Image (cartoon, grey):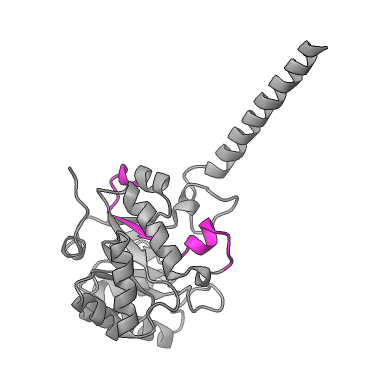
Amino acid sequence: MTTPLSAAAIRARKGGARLVMLTAYDYPTARALDESGLDILLVGDSLGEVELGYDTTRAVSLEMMAHHVRAVRNGASATHVCGDLTAGSYATPGQAVASARRLVEAGADSVKLEGGLVAQVEAIIAAGIPVIGHVGLLPQTAEVYRREGTTPEEADRIAAEARALDAAGVCALVIEAVPAELAERITAEVGCPTIGIAAGPECDGQVLVVTDLVGGLPSAPRFVKPKADVYGAVVGAARAFAAEVRGAAAAEARRAV
Ligand code: KIV
């Protein structure tokens, strides 16, 4: 039986086979992804946007996240499950540890948090819980979603943040929406694997929002080429069912006259 990758095994993938991470939010999707041989399932707080229909990830509470982590864990026995610490749930090191413990209790193998919060990362790791860092575009605090690190000053700040998180012991680092050259530079400067999204091809792995990958909504971000049309398949199946039911009812009504 395959067992989920440990944090040490994830960190040891630096420079080796690329890490493949997808988000997951529910039991059936987690089951399908667990069967697909991925390395990490991220119960991302993109949950709020693509699964629950809010216009911000900030709408997701820690309890909502724990509920979805449980559903994903129920479907994923072979894959490492990482839960996102939600906006406002890690303002201090103490709160960060309590929130991380809540997600582990719900079934997470590790947690992810946004930004260069070294004290929080150190406290969570000291409590025995692995952490994945996240730099570049930080959706929990961004006013608008835009490419980060496009000036030399911003690029240096993000690279410094990445090095500090690496030194604090994160097992991997998500880099979101930065120029490919900056992602490549960070990948060369840190000892943990980097996992990119909209950050070019040179990271140690890649992550996508599963809804975007499978065409679960009518449109996806420009950097994603959907590999399925789940939205279209649902509309098609529902229309076929409606036609079947209405057709049967019409035939019955004709028989009755
Ligand atoms: O919440 C999320 O889905 C994420 C990924 C975009 C990395 O943080």
- Indicate left or right for 5 with 29 as reference: left
If the image is split into quadrants, where does the N terminus sit?
top left
Q: Depth check: 153 or 120 in front? A: 120
- Along the horizontal axis of the image, is 162 left or right of 15? right
Q: Is residue 238 left or right of residue 149?
A: right
Quarter occupied by residue 86: bottom left
Q: Does 201 appear above or below 95?
A: above
Can I make out residue 152 in this image?
yes
Q: Which residues are magenta?
A: 33-55
Placement of 254 over or under 183, stated as above or below: above
- Residue at coordinates 24% horizontally, 75% vertically from top-left? 190
Residue at x 21%, y 76% (from the top left corner):
127
Residue at the limit of the structure toward the front, as seen here = 256
Task: Tell whether position 110 is magenta.
Answer: no
Q: Residue at x 34, y 74 (%)?
A: 99
Q: Residue 152: where, in percent of width, then height?
A: 41, 85
x, y (%) of residue 181? Answer: 37, 72
